Image: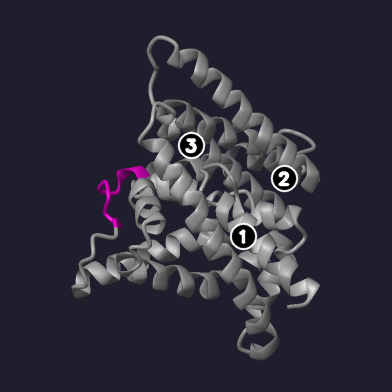
Amino acid sequence: MDRDNLITILKGMWIGGTMTVPGVSGGSMAMILGVYDRLISSVSSFFRNPGKSMSFLVRFVLGAGVGMVLFSRFISFLFTTRADVPLRFFFLGAVAGGVPMIYREAGIRRISLGAVAYPIIGILGVVILALLPAGLFAPDGSFGPGAVLIQLAGGVIIAVGLVLPGISVSQMLYMLGIYEGIIKNISTLNILPLIPLGAGVLGGIFLTAKVLEGLMQRHPQPTYLIILGFMFGSLPELFPGIPQGIDIVYGVIAAALGFAALYVMAGKEG
């Protein structure tokens, strides 16, 4: 295996692993590591140049899969320990830490109607997601026609979080109420229930990559402002409640660490 192939796999491992942490955007992480443009172009040009695209995507997806399994096992373990509450505050801080990067990318120079309206659209998107029945897209192992269609639809929604920089796919899973179930299935390699959802994600990536790529290029400010609204709207969903006793201290420290980690990583992208 040559050096470039190995680097692609290692980058895939890191991006796939960190995507299991709510607040960490796979798209932003790919930008930081310098592979985002190649990922998007490989997906959008897949049917025009399948050989070249497949060669890169297979290596990247292999690494991402290994990284997701390793990280998800660690996170699943932490959920069963006293680290559960601080971990959730870390996630909350991580989401907040990504906000300055999105604001910077939006390039706001002055307050305008759009600067207010587009974030509101993002917040309304979160409200609509919150109105969906809890666990609607949960991979319960049912393969009936209705269940499969729901899973496919859920996968398309999740695909947006994979493609757009700034949106965390794990944060999206939290919003849909299926984060912990997905993490548990991945960590135990219980892949069968995830197949319909995964198929929706794969199809959604191909369907949305070109559209989202165009939006980012032609209308970057509205796109980033909507993402910003989505992030603001999701913060209450991630809040685990007010902890008791010493857990308050641990929670504050964890939130600060999460904010700092994402703020520094996002700064590298800029």
Q: Residue at x 61, y 24 (%)?
A: 256
**Point 27% across, 54% down: residue:** 136
**Color theme of the render:** one colour
Give, as a three-letter code, the residue at label 2: Ala
Percent from the top left, x then y, of residue 257?
A: 62, 28
Q: Main secondary structure of the magenta part?
A: loop
**Front one among 230 and 14:** 14
The type of residue carrying mark 1 is Met
List the residue tagged with mark 1: 13
Q: Secondary structure at mark 3?
A: helix
Q: Secondary structure at mark 2?
A: helix
Mark 3 burial class by Cα count in 10 Å: few <14, some 14-19, many 20+: many
Residue found at x 35% / y 57%: 185
Q: Earlier in the sequence, mark 3 or mark 2?
A: 2
The amino acid type found where label 3 is placed reads Gly
Residue 106: mark in rendering: 2
Question: Circle 1: is it few (<14), some (14-19), or many (20+) Cα within 10 Å?
Answer: many
Left or right of 50 on screen, residue 143 = left
Residue extent of the magenta highlight: 130-138
For the C terminus, the image quarter is top right
Residue 21 in sight from this viewpoint: yes
- Is 135 magenta? The answer is yes
Is 66 colored magenta in this rendering?
no
State the image coordinates of residue 168 (x, y, percent, origin top left).
Answer: 55, 49
- Residue at x-position 69% and y-position 58%: 30
- Lower sequence index among marks 3 and 1: 1
Give residue 72's position: percent from left, percent from top. 46, 50
Residue 21 spot, x, y in % from top left: 52, 44
Name the residue that disc number 3 marks.
233
